[in-house]
Every structure is written in C-alpha cells, then in structure tokens.
Amino acid sequence: MSKNFQRYTVTAALPYANGGVHIGHLAGVYIPADIYCRYLRLKNEDVLFICGSDEHGVPVTIRAAKEGITVQEVVDKYDKIIGDSFKEFGISFDIYSRTSKPIHHETSREIFKTLYDKGVFVEDTSEQYFDPIAHKFLADRYIVGTCPVCGHTDAYGDQCENCGTSLTPDKLINPRSKLSDATPTKKETKHWYFPLDKYEAWLKEWILEGHKEWKTNVYGQCKSWLDAGLQPRPMTRDLDWGVPLPIPNTDGKVMYVWFDAPIGYISATKDYFAQKNADADAWKPYWKDESTKLVHFIGKDNIVFHCILFPAILKAEGSYILPENVPANEFLNLADAKISTSRNRAVWLDEYLREFEGKQDVLRYVLTANAPETKDNSFTWKDFQDRNNNELVSNLGNFVNRVLTLTQKYFDGVVPPLNDLEKVDIDLVESLRTFPNKIGESIENYRFREALGYIMELSSIGNKYFQENEPWKLAKDFEGNKARIENVLHLALQLTANLAFLIEPFLPFTAQKLQKALGVGKFYWNELGNQDLLISGQKIEQTGLLFEKIEDDIVQKQLNILAEREKMNELDNKKPQPLASEITYDDFAKLDIRVATILKAEKMPKSDKLLKLLLDTGIDERVVLSGIAKHFSPEEVVGKQVCVLCNLAPRKMMGEMSNGMILMAEDKDGSLKFIEPSAAIWNGAKIS
C-alpha cells in the first residue's frame, strides 16, 4: 500500500572533496536527484534536498600527498570547485554542506556514542595491514592490488573501480601500499566493529520482503550481499584525518568514512536549519517523522553502504526513519571506456561550464536522455552534438521559435483569442491533458529518461499540429482565415506554456527563459495539461533561439582534449625498458666515450632519418651519421657538445662511412635528447 507523505528528505551522494565532478557523477546521481526535487517543488510538496562534500575519505589524503599540500587545503580547494560547479549547473540543493564542519563532527560522535553506550559495537583486536616502510596502518584505500574478479591491477582494498566489485584487502592479489609501494605486513590493532550479521534477518525482511519495488539493480545487489551472509565491519580506522572517536584513550583512531559520511545528510539538515536560525528541533521531522519520505540518490558503487550498512546503523540507533527508496543508476562510460579520475579520463563539469557557456541545459538533456538507468551507457561528443542539433534545436527549439515568431508577426506578440474548435484542435487539447500525469508517473518511479521522452513527444505533437495546419499559408488570405490562424496560434501558445513548466525539472534555464518570455506566473504540476495557462490578449516576448547548433569544430576540439589527455596519461604511466643482461667492468672498460663538438651538419641525400655530422673529438675530426633528422635540423645541432662512442667499428651507410655513434636518450613521448655535458668541457674528455 502506498503511503501519504507530508514531506520529502532527498539526499544526493556526498562527493569526495579530492577532485571535481564529472559527467558520470552527474548522470548517475545529481541530475536525477535534481529532476526529482524540482518536480516535487512543482507539486508544492515540502521537500529538502541535501548534499555536501565528503572530506574524510582516504582519497582526500591521497590527493593531498599527490599535490604536495595539506589535507585541509585539498578539501577547501575542491569543496569550492564542486560547490560552485553545482550552483552554476543548476543543481538546486537546499544546502550543500561539509563533513569537516563542527556540526557534522558533533552529530557523528553523538550517534557513535549512542551505539557505543548501548553495547552495539564489538571491540576486537585483530591484525591489520601495516606499511613497514611508512610505519603506518593502511586504510583500505591505501592498499592496491589485483582484483580477484576482473584482474584489474590497481583495485583498491575496498572496491575495484574497474568492475565495481566490493572487496576487502585480504581478497586482493599481490597487495601493495600506496604510500611506499611496499608489500604490507600484518600488525595488531584494536577496532570497534558493527555487527552486521546480527541485522541480517531484519535486513532480509526489510529489503527483500518490504521493498520489492526497488530498482532491479539495487534489489539484486542487496540480495546478493544478504545471500552471501553479512559479517561484522570495522567502524574505526587508524588515521590522523577524520572524525575522532568519542571514547577515551583512542588517539590516532577516527571513524570509518562510511560510518560518518551518510550521517553527513543528517548533519547537513541540522546545518540548513541552523543557518536559518530555526528552532533547535526543526530538523527532526525530516529524519524522525514516519510521514517523511527519505530517498537516497547514489551510484551503484554505493548501494551496499546506503541500503545495508547505513540503514542498519540507523536501526540500531533507534530513532531515525529509514529510506523508502534508493534509486541507484549504473555507470556512464566515456566513449565505451570507463571514466577514470586517476587517469584524467573524464569530462569535468567545471571545464564544461567554461567551454560551453550558457549551455547547461544541453548537457542536462543529453545525460538524461542517455542516462544509465538500467545498464551502463556511454557518452560521446558525437551523440552530444546529434542530440543537441536533432532533438533540442530541431524539435523543441524549432517548435517554440516558430510559435513565438508567428505570434509576433501576425498578432504583434499578443495571445490571440480562441474560437470554435475543430476536431484537430480538440485532439490536441485532449492529448495535452494526458502528458503531465504520464511525465509525473515516470518521475515518481525514477524513470527520468522515459519522462524526458514524453516531453519531447509532446513537442513533436506540437510541431506536427503546426505543420499540418500551416498558419503561414493561411496568412496569405489573413482576413479570410483569421479565426483559424487565431486558433492554431492560441493552442500552440498554450502548449508552449505547458512545456515551459513541464521541462522545468529537466531544463531549468530554458524553462526560466521561456516562462519569462510568455509572461506567465507560477503554476503547479496539477494545473498543467490545461489550455488556459495564457489569457487571450496577454503580451508575450520573442525569446530568440532557445538552442543553437553545435558545429563540428567544437566537437573536434573536445575530442582533441581527450586524445591529448590519453597521450599524457600513457606517458605518465610509461615504464623504462628492462635492464639489459649483466656485463662485467672489463666489458664496460672497452667503451671509449668522448666529448666532441659538432662542427658541421647536413642532411643525407635520399634519407629522411640521417644527418651527416662532422665532429671534433679532440683527437681527430670525423664523420658520424646519426638518425636524428626527424628530431633536429642541421642548424640546431651545429656547435653542440655531445658524447660519442669513438671506438665503434666504422659502418657504411647510404654510401657514406660512419665513424662512431652519438649517445642519445629517448624521452617518454618518443623525442630524442642529446647526452651532453652540463657545462663546456674540452673536446676529447673521456667519459668514465
């Protein structure tokens, strides 16, 4: 039986403050959550939309070490980048908070202490992974190794980002420390465990029997975990960054990030009302009243934490409501390959906003139309271009532009009156009435891609109606066809006004622009589908084009950026060639390497690789042929001091005898570099 809820608490997964937000995050979590909340507001529901930066995860400390700055500097930097990007992109959080705030520490410690005092935790001393070089205990994310499921060689100790499998460090093959690359050892330490096994029966009843309506991927993953049997999970870590334990004599230990991070939703709610100077208990109905619907929007890699661990913690605490739904999406790939933040293989939101100024809704549209709701999907720049040009521009934009342009042309921008309806008009009106319910039902069942499809279907109906009635042709005898032209424009304008609100959850910037042009007030969802949103005689404005075509050169620029990043990543990960077989000192002593100066240089005829060099070795002047013509011009090398293997047997090349070999080094990108003295030295100096 469906419940009647008085309010909604909607959370979006807290992003780690160790980098920006990319399109995978947007498609998986933030756009669906924003659509849902904007829709609820249009229904005039009491909804609180919550998010914030997760600043205590190990990825944050790893990023700080990589950038050579403090952890606090890292979280401050990326919290601002993320928060500013969300705001500019139109993600309508009621609050975007931070887990480093005192209110979050207080809330987390309070819940931990409640469980501790109730005897929920199991205190146990066990052997944990320890870095023998860095002399530190290693949290899961500080341990990497080969995934036992997919063979990915850089899986983390808690999860493989390649296949999404949840792991423990013990399951990794050939584990190694991210701090020193050393093989970790085991060392005894004390931790507090949450006994998930004791909540297994309750979780089975609550999820498997009570929430069969959850999305298949969510329900299936939960069932898999529960069928495999749950084990106690440590809720503390040996780290110096995080929420300290509210237990005496526990210095150097903090809460496990997946204990305190979901509590960030609760602390952010407290933060929201505190900023409004509300009553100290104003937050409680949103977390402790059974008439509140709690919905978590997450990616599939967070399902176990939001569906099993966090609900069990709240159940153990005893005073909080539990989630009614956890609509997790699958992964969005980039051109059929996994998005990787560590490899910088992503489309970053802050960069998109700079490159595509004013085109927030285009990305919102594309990521919704191609959302990974039931399976992994891929984003490509070609699809981005095609959907913009063929759907937004040619369908929705084309319809609105024609309606408003002809209204200006024939009626000076005034909504014409409605006269007696013909069958085609009645069909349009009856069809319009059905769409708000269809769209709303899809949104309420978290089928946002389907809901957006209905909107574009309605726009197509408008285009078809306009095309079949051809008011521009009727206008050739304007006075004779005036009543018919008035009807066509009036109804097309009413459909446009409905679209201006129906698109608001999906395309908020476009909706705002269109609503302003139409001069309409505020309408709620239950008022849509009607033919009287606009009043005859009402003045409207021309908006200009809602969407612009994206040309090939814009797409190519983005493809070039991706290609360059791929290349840079390959170079960063390129390994030196293995060492050659061992030689003795006597072998090395046979090599006579001298410093020489290049006196002359010229290209070898009929060769695109060889330069003919005349060298002063201090002993003689000799010709050496060197395969560097693709890297250096003759003019660049004249006067350079180089190292030459002088006692290499002469070799005939292209009809010319070469007497030696210039020593070169190949860089990661394949370019050649001379091995040369750091300061000028006499020719003939021997390298030893």
Image (cartoon, rainbow, N blue to C red):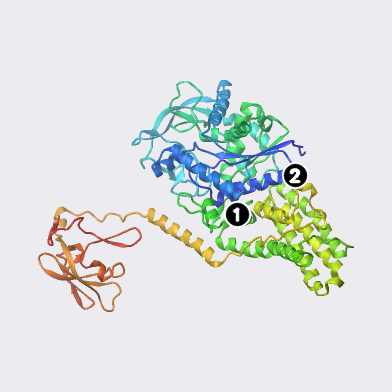
Q: Quadrant of residue 223?
A: top right
Q: Which of the labelled discs sits on residue 412, or is there none?
A: none
Kindly give the residue lying farthest to the left in the view shown: 619
Q: Is residue 606 above or below residue 162?
A: below
Q: Position of residue 251 (x, y in %)?
A: 43, 25
> Quadrant location of the C terminus?
bottom left
For residue 632, side relative to residue 258 (left or right): left
Task: Identify the residue at horizontal 71%, vertical 31% (top origin).
Answer: 290
- The residue wearing badge 1 is 360
For residue 25, side relative to residue 444 (left or right): left
Sequence order check: which comes first, mark 1 or mark 2? 2
- The residue wearing badge 2 is 43
Q: Of the residues shown, which amino acid type is indicated by label 2?
A: Lys
State whether residue 573 appears in this view: no
**Mark 1 to mark 2 CA distance (whole Å):** 24 Å
Q: Is residue 490 above or below residue 252?
A: below
Q: Position of residue 436 (x, y in %)?
A: 77, 51
Q: Of the residues shown, which amino acid type is indicated by label 1?
A: Gln
Kindly give the residue lying farthest to the right in the view shown: 420
Bin the neighbour count of mark 1 within 10 Å (Cα to Cα): few under 14, some 14-19, many 20 and up: some
Q: Position of residue 306 (x, y in %)?
A: 60, 38
Bin the neighbour count of mark 2 within 10 Å (Cα to Cα): few under 14, some 14-19, many 20 and up: some
> Quadrant location of the N terminus?
top right
Task: Identify the residue at horizontal 38%, vertical 42% (top origin).
Answer: 68
Q: Is residue 500 above or below residue 116?
A: below
Decide which of 527, 134 is in the foreground and name it. Answer: 527
Give the SS element for disc 1: helix
Q: Quadrant of residue 211?
A: top right
Q: Position of residue 16 (x, y in %)?
A: 51, 42
For residue 164, side relative to residue 632 (left or right): right
Give the SS element for disc 2: loop
